[in-house]
Amino acid sequence: MNVQVSILAAGMGTRLGRPLPKSQTRLRDGRTIMQQQVDNLRSVLGADVPITVVVGFKATVIMEARPDVLFAYNELFDSTNTSKSLLRALVTSQPGGVLWLNGDVVFDPRILLDVQPWLSRDESFVCVNTEAVGDEEVKYTVDAEGFVQELSKTVVGGLGEAVGINYVSSRDKAVLIECLRACEDQDYFERGIELAIERGVRVAPVDISARDVVEIDFEQDLVRADAIDAEHLRLDVHTSVDAL
């Protein structure tokens, strides 16, 4: 199975109030958020998994820190939102589906094992946490068949929160690209997913509530991330999805 990954790290991260991009924030174990992400991806998906980082704000800081990955540049990082960074990621990707992460997500690498069945079947999905439904978080509802119907911060009666780890299948990618192009500059990429769903794309909600995952927006999020058991942020033994 060929898997390619994009990390969206173009934003300015103003809510966290740090001088560097959020992806370069150091965690308790000394690694940056991005280093932890790359370590997780390679420990599960293989050392040669293609990783492209979408950069913008202080792009050279990230590029100098990660000379071992590829880059795409969102030159409008200061006037656009994640819909346009994901668009840049998808139009520069290789043929096939794309797994993408927000560049501020601290997560248990076993999530990548949990989603392996959907990756193997090349089926679009969003990872969700059904244990919490925060007012400021991206929430979702499902249709009669259990696929995502609504996905935004304004959803009423949300069943849980999207956590920032997602996949678009090879057959759905072209539609999602069109929908991201149709998004307003300040739209989050979830709006593109909603538009794609309206055009018939089916997106599965994958419940990863049993795993630790934190999106870093504010200082208290960083405190929560640093409280995660260190054993839940690494895989001690190299595990490839091909071997599962």
Image: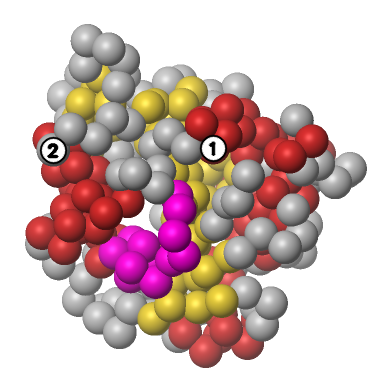
- The magenta segment is 85-97
- Name the secondary structure under disc 1: helix
Q: Is residue 112 left or right of residue 77?
A: right
* Picture quarter with the N terminus: top right
The front one of 201 and 39 is 201
Q: Does 100 sit above or below residue 156?
A: below
* Amino acid type, callout 2: Arg
For residue 36, above or below residue 170: below
In the depicted structure, whether residue 194 falls above or below residue 133: below
- Location of mark 1 (residue): 119
Magenta-span inclusion, residue 17:
no
Q: Give the x, y percent position of residue 229.
A: 75, 37
Please indicate whether residue 18 sits to the left or right of residue 241 in the image. left
Q: Callout 2 environment at 10 Å: few (<14), some (14 to 19), or many (20+)?
A: few
The residue identified by callout 2 is: 199
**Residue at left offset 69%, top offset 49%:** 45
| 238 horizontally vs 107: left or right | right
Residue 210 appears in which quarter of the rendering? top right
